[in-house]
Amino acid sequence: MCLMNENEFRIFSGLFERAVEKCFGHSFSSALTETESKRFSDVILEATGLVVGWKTLKNYSIACLRGDAGSENPSTASLDSLARYVMNAPITTEPERKKASSPYEHWFRYKGAQAGAHANSDQTNTGTGESKYQGTPEHGKPQMARINQKRSQKRRIIRWFSATIFIILLTVVFITIKQANKKNFTDDFSDTKQLEKRGWSIINPDIQFWNNRSINAGVLTLYTLFGDNWPDSLHPQPAIRNMLIREIKPGSYTVSMDLRKFLPLHRWEQAGMILLEDTSFHSKSLRISIAFNDNFGGYTRSPEILIQAIKSDLANSLKPEEIVHHPLFVLDSISSRPAILSNFDYTSLQIRGKDGKMELLYAAGSESNSAYHQVATTTIDFVPKYIGIFAIKGLVSNKTITPVFIDGFRLAYDK
């Protein structure tokens, strides 16, 4: 840990403020919430390849707002990660950084540049401030008072004019941002290296598999890792690894995701989309997925491939509600009708939302232009703030991990 003096803490505070502004698009004025801290941590990981824990970032925000140099002693590694993020440094990993001859060079470069700028500013201000009115005679004081009064009036006029212009600009910016946030969004995942710059964040990253997201050109490759947002007695804390999320605005919208050749073949293996009230999984959510099921409560039946939809409110209940269980086919039918498998060359899931009313749809076929079919309509009693795409194998211990190829995502707001 590095023990900071006041000047170093000032530089650190400025670095943290710049990083927050880069991440969220607005100035740093209040302590980060848990959700904001987690998003900030995920954005830094996506941009740099390095981890700064969300709790650490939350504590930094509190210390910077208080201006308390003694409350936090940031590690040099964390400072360097923040500097790398602000300076748009190339992506690396922790082992690669440690191998470098100067592993924390970005922090020291940033600190040196800021310290030099501050010293030059102090020197300039001191030189002009001490000598401007030296030697003014006593009989010149009334004249100086009038001059100062006029200057004060001019400053007040300038401040008033500047404040008015600032308010006008702020209003224009606010309206522009509000309209921009409602713009439609499409991602074909032809580039999976710049996801953060396109508004995506990663939740609960598994670095090994996340680093393999670009292994197949032209698609985003996720993997059916252990996890679920449906908890059980052995795993009461829900978690989905490597889930990509982005913000979604309230109103009327249609959101879709496209998959290529995804056929789940193991218990609770699935991929799909989820609407979230927040990113903690301890609030309300709605998910739709293509899934495998071989659990029939003790009855013997052929495993099935299905469309499943689940509503969860884990803040008030540990029992999610399965609102859709729509079988597509049973595996026994493949031997007599193998052409069924071609329906999974192109599959797509879609959610159409309007004022809490949700329409859930599914499309599949050997061509990409297959029509959507409605599988259910439902209502939700929360306003989704995020839409996520995910792949999981549920809370099962089998070692099989299946790649899931995602080649399209669309979010369109109704006019």
Image: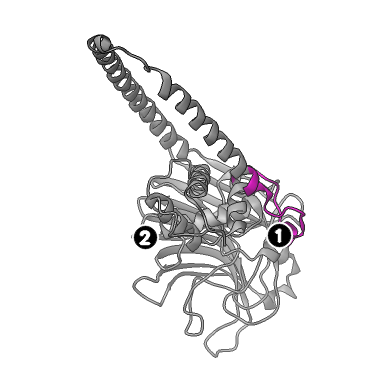
Q: Residue at point 41% right, 45% down?
A: 252
Residue identified by numbered label 2: 380
Left or right of residue 303, residue 252 in this image = left
**Residue type, mark 2 in image:** Ile
Residue identified by numbered label 1: 211
Q: What element carries label 1?
A: loop
**Which quadrant does the N terminus fall into?**
bottom right
Q: Nearer the viewer, mark 2 or mark 1?
A: 1
Magenta residue span:
86-109
**Which quadrant does the C terminus fall into?**
top left
Q: Does residue 201 appear anywhere in the picture? A: no
Which scheme is used to colour this image of the protein? one colour
Q: Is mark 2 on a helix, strand or loop?
A: loop
Q: Is residue 240 shown in magenta? A: no
Q: Which residue lies furthest to the bottom in this view?
A: 298
Residue 286, image x, y percentages: 45, 63
